Image (tube, grey):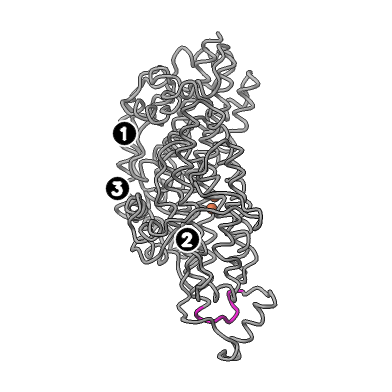
Amino acid sequence: MTPSDRFDFLLRMGDSTLVLAQRLSEWVGKGPVIEEDIALTNVGLDLIGQARMWLSYAGEVEARGRDEDALAFRRDAHEFRNALLVEQPNGDYAETMARQFLFDHWHLLALKAMERSRDERVAAIAAKSSKEVAYHVERSTDWVIRLGDGTDVSHRRMQDAVDGLWMFAGELFLPDAVDAAAREAGVGPDLAALAAPWRSAVGAALAEATLTMPGDDWAQRGGRQGRHTEHLGHLLTEMQFLQRAYPDAKW
Amino acid sequence: MYAQMVDTGLKQVAEATGMSPEESAFQARVDADVKVEPKDWMPEAYRRTLVRQIQQHAHSEIVGMLPEGNWVTRAPSLKRKAILMAKIQDEGGHGLYLYSAAETLGVSRDNLIDDLHAGRSKYSSIFNYPTLNWADIGAIGWLVDGAAIMNQIPLCRCSYGPYARAMVRICKEESFHQRQGFDIMLAMCRGTPEQKAMAQDSLDRWWWPSLMMFGPSDAESVHSAQSMRWKIKLLSNDELRQRFVDQTVPQAEFLGLRVPDPELRWNDERGHYDVGTIDWKEFQDVLRGHGPCNRDRIRTRTKAWEDGEWVREAAVAHARKRAERAARAAA
Ligand SMILES: [Fe+2]
Ligand SMILES: [Fe+2]
């Protein structure tokens, strides 16, 4: 695995966790009940912590002097390697929870596989993160079930959310050359092999939630290659404002 | 509004001669520093005053999340973002402890929240000021959490058990917040000229509102005198404000910032700083709804509550379905 592939692979993990954390931080003070406000922030905090570990390591591998903040705040959208799923807007609570649910199940499987990574740093970050993400899975799954099997209104909203986001889940399981290099080196997971356990976990939860699993498996792709939806540019504009406007400042 | 300007509903301080045997026994226990617990008998005016005070305090924690939330998506580093998220999360937790403390007095959180949205209940007027640059996040931690601590440390000894215990937990976290806020200010004051200017602008805007947080002088107030007898207020507004000024002015000097008060000076005789005249008209205006952000704050809170209604209903409906299924399975 070349250093440049390893760097790219680490950005994929770091950017997905960072962008999702940024989305969750948009909920601050606006949750449906205070307990949820706190819980969303808690998940966001876990993800920020993980992003910092992935991006710091990515910067070391790149060896061009970029630290976590240089990578988070000084790259443009086409240089981001996050999954398209996590950059999708928050929408209502059903959309936020459906996005989280689809991602969390993939995230946990990927981390579990990486706990056995031949790259010790990757293995260590995965081991620490997977404990946190196991709880994220529990929480988002619980909300999909509560809203799916709640009232007629919540059922409809959750079904719409799952239907709308489904096309962004597929790319999580479609490896490109970088993913193949990471797998061959024993560094990253076999993404295609995660699809079956993901479908079965997600399917079981949807069934319990009285929701229908979407039948169309056509997938939007491009996030891990730097081709994003229109939403990412706006997210970065906001997130990167201070570092861009005052490039000489230390905060 | 933490413990300031809380209406007791009374026209004069209850005197021993006019008290029923229950009231005298209650006052004797308070005088002896025995904590009042939810199941104990208490005067109705004591209960109502506490509800009002704890409710205002709880609302302040929750509304206070909004000015900070305004910068959480724009925090300038990942570390600062994580610290700010953790702080805002703490404030939500403070709101929860306090609503729980209020609920021990026979009111429900939902009703208290309705009071906030309908404008029947107050929150600290400081949160009606806007956060216009990143230094404001530092200033809030340093000054607003700092002022809150001044207020709340004495309340750890207040007469009502659940409130006192909530305060002990909260104060520990507030002192972290204050240090983190000061650390933001320090980084900016040692930074570029633009950062230093932001820090000064921020102090210029937050200094006077922070002093107003302690409320107008209450030396003559019947309500404060009664609250002090009940030990749900332990120090006067002016005493607390003086402590805050004495603590904060040297910190501003350390930062190299100018406190925006030309009359501020150390008084050797008193052993305290003298401050200029506070513009209480501004305070009363903000209290009446004429502050920069009153409308935005309440609109944001109300919208969050209304947008979340279907979620809360779904959670209740789901819990009911589960219970019914469990009951059927058991039968
Ligand atoms: Fe607080
Ligand atoms: Fe605080």
Q: Position of residue B43 (x, y in %)?
A: 54, 82
Of all chains, the one bearing label 3 is A
Q: Is residue A103 visible?
A: no
Q: Position of residue A72 (x, y in %)?
A: 48, 24
**Amino acid on which disc 3 is placed:** Arg
Name the residue that disc number 1 marks.
A215
Considering depth in this image, is A94 or A7 the residue closer to the camera?
A7
- Label 2, residues with CA under 10 Å away: few <14, some 14-19, many ≥20: many
Considering depth in this image, is A49 or B194 the residue closer to the camera?
B194
Of all chains, the one bearing label 1 is A
Q: Position of residue A39 (x, y in %)?
A: 50, 47
Considering depth in this image, is B160 or B270 the residue closer to the camera?
B270
- Residue A202 appears left or right of B303: right
Element marked by disc 1:
loop
Name the residue that disc number 3 marks.
A156
The residue segment tinted magenta is B37-45
Q: Is residue B209 magenta?
A: no
Of all chains, the one bearing label 2 is B
Residues at marks 1 and 3 on the same chain: yes
Q: Is mark 3 within 8 Å of ligand 1?
A: no
Task: Identify the disc placed on residue B224.
Answer: none
Q: Is residue B257 visible?
A: yes
Task: Identify the disc placed on residue B1.
Answer: 2
Residue positioned most to the right = B32
Q: Is residue A121 above or below residue B211?
A: above
Considering depth in this image, is A250 or B321 the residue closer to the camera?
A250
Residues at marks 1 and 2 on the same chain: no
- Residue B83 appears left or right of A95: right
- Label 3, residues with CA under 10 Å away: few <14, some 14-19, many ≥20: some
**Amino acid on which disc 2 is placed:** Met
Q: Is residue B40 magenta?
A: yes
**Amino acid on which disc 1 is placed:** Gly
